[in-house]
């Protein structure tokens, strides 16, 4: 690899070392008075949508229940419905704003499965474009994001009136 600019990876490595199990970044995003600083796109009745600070791709979003729980069994039926409505509207927002060719949507339950934050359940929504894996060094777990997070945030924020939960 010639050039790799992904400063958030270093932050992530530091974050996981220092902040492990001390703070919950989703609960911080729920509580913040400055949603733009935490990249919060939507906070609804029962769910929240925010951008991943350590994205796998441009427009990588996280949808989570407002309640700090780690398993589906701890969510009510209303919580689950809210999360699915938010997921659906987030996909619509990404399609409208960033015009992706597809999505990877997934949940990592437990640290063994790759959850960076296992204490607060969240759904990853990763838009995909044809050819975006061409130079993606999967093995190295690093990837160059072509757009800065704040630019993407502003674009998504402009269309976020369609979000619901
Ligand atoms: Zn939490």
Image (tube, rainbow, N blue to C red):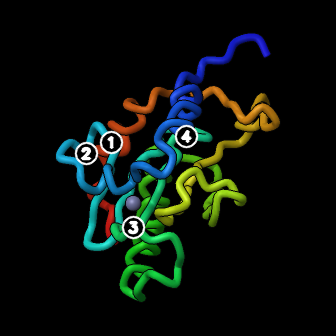
Q: Earlier in the sequence, mark 1 or mark 3?
A: 1
Q: Earlier in the sequence, mark 3 or mark 2?
A: 2
Which residue lies most toward the bottom here? Answer: 77
State if disc 3 and disc 1 touch (CB < 8 Å).
no
Given residues 71 and 135, the one toward you in this image is 71
Mark carried by residue 26: none
In this view, 24 is above or below 46: above
- The residue positioned 50% from the left and 66% from the top of the image is 121
Residue marked by disc 1: 38
Residue 145 image-quadrant placement = top right
Q: CA distance from mark 2 to mark 1?
A: 5 Å
> Looking at mark 4, is its residue's CB closer than 8 Å to ligand 1?
no
> Looking at mark 3, is its residue's CB closer than 8 Å to ligand 1?
yes
Q: CA distance from mark 4 to mark 2?
A: 22 Å
State if disc 1 and disc 4 touch (CB < 8 Å).
no
- The residue positioned 28% from the left and 60% from the top of the image is 43
- The residue positioned 50% from the left and 62% from the top of the image is 119
Picture coordinates of residue 79 (x, y %)?
A: 39, 80
Q: Secondary structure at mark 2?
A: loop
In this view, 67 is above or below 108: below
State if disc 2 and disc 3 touch (CB < 8 Å).
no
Mark carried by residue 35: 2
Q: Earlier in the sequence, mark 4 or mark 2?
A: 4
Mark 2 crowd level (few <14, some 14–19, many ≥20, 10 Å Cα): some
In this view, 136 is above or below 20: above
Residue marked by disc 4: 16
Q: CA distance from mark 3 to mark 2?
A: 18 Å
Q: Quadrant of the N terminus?
A: top right
Residue marked by disc 3: 68
Front: mark 4 or 2: 4
Q: CA distance from mark 4 to mark 3?
A: 19 Å
């Amino acid at each position: 690899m010639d050039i790799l600019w992904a400063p958030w990876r270093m932050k992530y490595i530091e974050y996981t070392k220092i902040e492990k199990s001390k703070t919950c970044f989703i609960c911080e995003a729920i509580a913040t008075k400055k949603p733009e600083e935490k990249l919060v796109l939507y906070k609804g009745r029962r769910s929240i949508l925010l951008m991943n600070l350590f994205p796998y791709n441009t427009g990588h979003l996280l949808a989570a229940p407002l309640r700090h729980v780690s398993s589906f069994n701890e969510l009510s039926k209303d919580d689950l419905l809210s999360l699915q409505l938010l997921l659906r509207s987030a996909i619509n927002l990404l399609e409208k704003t960033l015009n992706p060719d597809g999505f990877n949507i997934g949940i990592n339950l437990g640290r063994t499965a790759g959850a960076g934050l296992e204490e607060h359940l969240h759904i990853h929504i990763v838009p995909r474009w044809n050819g975006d894996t061409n130079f993606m060094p999967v093995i190295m777990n690093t990837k160059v994001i072509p757009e800065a997070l704040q630019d993407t945030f502003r674009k998504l924020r402009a269309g976020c009136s369609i979000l619901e939960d």
